[in-house]
Amino acid sequence: MSLTLQFVPYSEIENLGPARRVNKLIAIVKQEKIVLLEGRLKKEEEADLIAITMEEIGDKFKGIELAVINPPKNEGFFAGVKSGMLSALLGDRQGFTVVGPASVVKQIKQDPNKIELFTQDSKKAAKKKRKKK
């Protein structure tokens, strides 16, 4: 089994409307690729991504796994000012979003220091489901 990660820089989606952003990500995931998106989606876009995914689930598309990693919050006055300035300048470019097809990504675990991405062979998963029937 090969695993494909596709990096999507924020500059590639920043001028797209919310629906086109979501559709672009779903199109990549449907190719059984794991998307590494620079930055993060807005909360409404995340909700749309999940809603559209639920509508499109079928025999060939099993859904998605999603994780959003935000930069750690530094405490202290100067760190807060610095963080506020960066947020004002960069906006949604801060952080990192991982979206993968549920047929490939079994689970995503995250903590402040790392992401653990557990994968499965989509062909083996399909064979196991056929055997259970």
Image (spheres, rainbow, N blue to C red):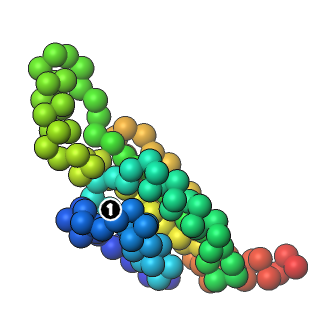
Residue farthest to the top, as pictured: 77
Q: Is 131 situated left or right of 56 in this image?
A: right
Q: Is residue 85 above or below residue 51?
A: above
Q: Residue at x 42, y 77 (%)?
A: 28
Q: Position of residue 91 (x, y in %)?
A: 23, 46
The answer to which of 39 and 103 lies nearer the viewer is: 39
Q: Circle 1 is placed at which residue position? A: 37
**Res 24 quadrant in image:** bottom left
Q: Residue at x 33, y 73 (%)?
A: 6
Please rate how many residues cluster around mark 1, counting C-alpha atoms within 10 Å: few if below 14, some from 14 to 19, many from 20. many
Q: Residue at x 13, y 34 (%)?
A: 85
Q: Is residue 62 above or below residue 14?
A: below
The answer to which of 109 and 26 lies nearer the viewer is: 26
| Any part of residue 24 in sight | yes
Q: Amino acid at mark 1?
A: Leu
Q: For the residue labelled by badge 1, is the local secondary structure a helix, a strand or a loop?
A: strand
The answer to which of 118 and 44 lies nearer the viewer is: 44
Residue farthest to the front, as pictured: 17
Q: Is 18 situated left or right of 64 in this image?
A: left
The number of numbered discs placed on residues in the rendered structure image is 1
Which quarter of the figure is the C terminus placed in?
Answer: bottom right
Q: Is residue 63 above or below residue 3?
A: above
